[in-house]
Amino acid sequence: MPRPRTITDEQIVVAARAAFLEQGFSATTAEIARRAGVSEGTLFKRFATKEDLFEEVMGLRESPAWHAELSARVGEGDVRRNLERAFLLYLDSARQIVPNLLLVFSRGYAPAHNPLLERLDNPMREDTQALASYLRAEVARGRIRPVDAEMTALALLGALLHFVHFWLMTHRGNPETLDAGRYVRGLLDLLWPGLEP
């Protein structure tokens, strides 16, 4: 009869996240196992490779909630409010994911030098496609004016991603940090006239 698990996968992921954030992808599985209080063998029984563990730490294995939110809202409610809700969800998840993506990119942008990029596909492209798909669907219904959906999606996501970097660099110990809701409303105040039918 196998022994019951004394540590959860989530506890291993927490230990791995701390090691990766401190040391980047070069953190060893021995160090991760030590932090988690398990053997390397146990680590590899739960996660077949270090890359599998890294993917789990990054939180990129599932489609982001805001993709589903936008997809479900096509033709429903107020377009601007739909975008506001989706963008707030985007910012919430991006605050968690962006530091992890930066760890991936620290190994370089060329797949030949950074095989993790191939495993992750391209989350930024997926985000752009999700937003562009929503915009195209609303253009087809006459709920926003005809725009180049891909370029509009890139511009909006670029502005949101900039906010995430700004927030990550300034939020610690700074009560004056810009509020996400205020930022999203201000961004749409600026750009909505170009989308409004």
Image (cartoon, rainbow, N blue to C red):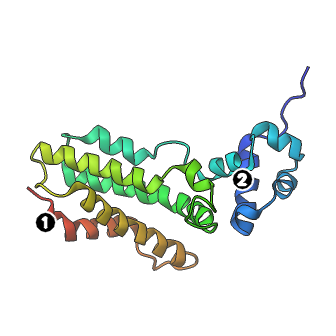
Q: Position of residue 108 (x, y in %)?
A: 60, 67
Residue pointed to by mark 1 = 193
User: Which comes sooner in the sequence, label 1 or label 2?
Assistant: 2
Tally of numbered discs: 2
Q: Where residue 56 sits: x, y (%)?
A: 64, 47
Q: Name the residue: 71% across, 61% down.
A: 25
Q: Nearer the viewer, residue 124 or 82?
A: 124
- Amino acid type of disc 1? Pro
Q: Which residue in the structure is indicated by mark 2? A: 14
The image quadrant where one finds the C terminus is bottom left
Measured along the vertical axis of the image, is residue 194 above or below residue 50? below
**Residue placed at 74% from the left, 68% from the top?**
23
Label 2 environment density (alpha carbons within 10 Å; few <14, some 14–19, many ≥20): some
* Image coordinates for residue 36, horizontal then vertical, percent: 82, 51
Q: Is residue 45 above or below residue 182?
A: above
Q: In the rendered view, tell whether residue 87 sits above or below residue 179.
A: above
Name the secondary structure under disc 2. Answer: helix
